[in-house]
């Protein structure tokens, strides 16, 4: 028997386009699946997400591949084995504050490696109503702390005359466990569309800085009550501090109004579980805040301290960021004290299928996407246009029906429609309506702001129609 041909990971990685051929690995085996890409039952674009790398992280998301006939198909394309790994390449400088960051899923589209910021690709974002943990978008401002669950403590500062709490994870488990489905969205979601209109400062998020999970933990109101807090202070805020910090020792921080924190119906959580698992490190292990209906920035991860204060958090991210301004305000004239911090987010929707620039078949088109609104407002309708907004059709809403005033999670939606005869291209547009009849603005121009936040104009996708 011949010994197998050996390839390095680097060689495999360089085969990730139609020009070079498409290689993938499973275990130590290497496959050239160039010929199979267009035959893939799950579609070429999904297979291409694994091009040049391992299949395991993708197949872990799609159990349909755990079948012998799938393995048999793959076996036909085997070209060799991986050579023993070149260890030197994986040694990181110990002085790197990010050296201890966790390993991430290769499907994530990385906007920044240090700190780590990444979003799931549109092909995967709306495949599941609940976003699988490994591809949930990640927004870190600092290195990920590595916390020991046994020595972890949450400090809850009590009111004057009350008692401060120092809670272990076990202490937190003693509070009634509350579980809810909540969509988290970064204020910078869809920022790249603002950048295309006019330059802004910030990470280039596409439409994937949003994800949905089942979160479980103790209700913040129960913990605050145990510390003796009451809803008596006027204009008071609950401030959160993370255990991640910059080289000067400054921690991530944010705050929410005390009224929201104390309201059992607002369901603010100190979450220790995400989709039935302990929180992954990137998402705040062991404890994070989840504030349903509120901008991602207030969902403080790696939570170390909770206190009730007369003023909002003095954190940079509460006072000098995550605020909206008029299009006329620039970096010379901006006065951050003049605008309120973003809390509840405006109504939002986006198209995840087809992709911008794609060529679709004539006949029928399937348009898919997500829609969500802040403050617990439910999405009541999504309108889709195939002609840039001249005429509209109503999409079908999927996903869990939401409770009135407590619609914390997104709706997925889809529309199947005939491609208008004779069209060579389509300008597909979507817009959502929430139960307060808030709508999305049609263009970016009137909502552009220097930081590129609150980007919720009609989402537009331009596609070609195959002749
Ligand atoms: C379905 C093979 C890579 C996502 C399938 C099926 C086969 C297959 C044979 C049909 C299974 C059945 O219904 O019994 C392969 C092979 C791959 C590959 C040989 C690599 C060379 C991927 C990747 C992804 C993916 C990387 C995701 C990122 C899917 C999905 C379906 C599917 C979502 C289900 C489609 C449906 O429900 O109709 N694949 N696959 N596949 N695959 Fe893959
Ligand atoms: N909490 C801490 N401690 N540090 C952070 O950098 N980022 C915030 C928030 N909580 C952040 C944090 C921002 S801006 C967002 S959008 C969400 O976490 C993102 O949560 P995720 O990474 O779990 O998606
Ligand atoms: Mo964010």
Image: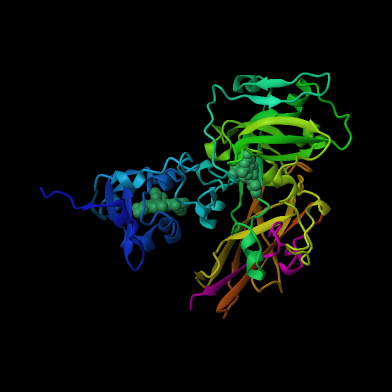
The residue located at (43%, 56%) in the rendering is 49
Find residue 121 and report its horizontal and vertical position in percent.
Answer: 52, 55
- Pick out the residue farthest to the bottom: 422
Placement of 453 over or under 104, stated as above or below: below
Q: Which residue lies furthest to the front in this view?
A: 248
Q: Compare residues 335 and 149 and report the one nearer the observer.
A: 335
**285 left or right, relative to 257:** left
Indicate whether 355 appears above or below 249.
below
**Horizontal placement of 369 versus 92: left or right?**
right
Coloring applied to the structure: rainbow
Foreground residue, 347 or 202? Answer: 202
Residue at x 65% of width, y 19% of height: 174
Instruction: Name the side, left or right, on which 272 lies relative to 34.
Output: right
Q: Where is residue 102 in the image (x, y as percent from the top left)?
A: 47, 40
Residue situated in front as seen by the camera: 97 or 299: 97
Q: Give the range drawn in magenta.
A: 439-467
Q: At which x and y percent is residue 320?
A: 73, 50
Q: Does the magenta stretch include residue 457?
A: yes
Q: In which quarter of the image is residue 394?
A: bottom right
Horizontal and vertical percent position of residue 61: 46, 45
Residue 322 is a magenta residue: no
- The image shows a total of numbered marks equal to 0
Principal SS element in the magenta part? Answer: loop
Whether residue 443 is visible, yes or no, is no
Is residue 211 something that shows in the picture?
A: yes
Rendering quarter of residue 176: top right
């Amino acid at each position: 028997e011949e010994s197998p041909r050996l390839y390095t990971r680097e060689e495999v990685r360089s085969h990730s386009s139609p020009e070079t051929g498409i290689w993938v690995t499973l275990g130590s085996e290497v496959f050239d699946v160039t010929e199979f890409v267009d035959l893939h039952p799950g579609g070429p674009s999904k297979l291409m997400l694994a091009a040049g790398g391992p299949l395991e992280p993708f197949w872990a998301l799609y159990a349909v591949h755990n079948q012998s006939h799938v393995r048999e198909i793959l076996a036909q394309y085997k070209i060799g084995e991986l050579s023993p790994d070149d260890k030197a390449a994986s040694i990181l400088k110990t002085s790197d504050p990010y050296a201890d960051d966790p390993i991430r899923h290769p499907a994530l589209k990385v906007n920044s490696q240090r700190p780590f910021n990444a979003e799931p690709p549109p092909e995967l974002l709306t495949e599941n109503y609940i976003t699988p943990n490994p591809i949930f978008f990640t927004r870190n401002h600092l290195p990920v702390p590595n916390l020991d669950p046994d020595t972890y403590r949450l400090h809850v500062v009590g009111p004057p005359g009350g008692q401060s709490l120092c809670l272990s994870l076990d202490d937190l488990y003693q509070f009634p466990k509350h579980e809810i489905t909540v969509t988290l969205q970064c204020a910078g979601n869809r920022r790249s569309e603002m950048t295309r209109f006019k330059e802004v400062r910030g990470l280039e998020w596409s439409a994937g800085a949003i994800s949905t999970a089942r979160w479980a933990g103790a209700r913040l109101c129960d913990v605050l009550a145990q510390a003796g807090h009451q809803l008596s202070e006027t204009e008071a805020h609950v401030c959160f501090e993370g255990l991640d910090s910059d080289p000067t020792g400054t921690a991530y921080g944010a705050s929410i109004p005390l009224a929201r924190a104390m309201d059992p119906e607002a369901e603010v959580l100190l979450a220790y579980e995400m989709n039935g698992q302990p929180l992954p490190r990137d998402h705040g292990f062991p404890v994070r805040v989840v504030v349903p209906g509120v901008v991602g920035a207030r969902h403080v991860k790696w939570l170390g301290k909770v206190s009730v204060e007369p003023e909002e958090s003095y954190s940079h991210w509460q006072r000098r960021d995550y605020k909206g301004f008029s299009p006329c305000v620039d970096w010379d004239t901006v006065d951050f004290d003049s605008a309120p911090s973003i809390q509840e987010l405006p109504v939002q929707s986006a198209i995840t299928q087809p992709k911008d620039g794609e060529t679709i078949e004539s006949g029928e088109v399937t348009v898919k996407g997500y829609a969500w609104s802040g403050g617990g407002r439910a999405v009541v309708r999504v309108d889709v246009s195939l002609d840039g907004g001249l005429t509209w059709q109503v999409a079908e809403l999927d996903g869990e029906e939401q409770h009135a005033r407590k619609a914390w999670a997104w709706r997925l939606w889809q529309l199947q429609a005939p491609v208008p005869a004779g069209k060579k291209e389509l300008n597909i547009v979507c817009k959502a309506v929430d139960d307060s009849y808030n709508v999305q603005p049609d263009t970016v121009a009137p909502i552009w702001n220097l930081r590129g936040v609150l980007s919720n104009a009609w989402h537009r996708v331009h596609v070609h129609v195959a002749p």
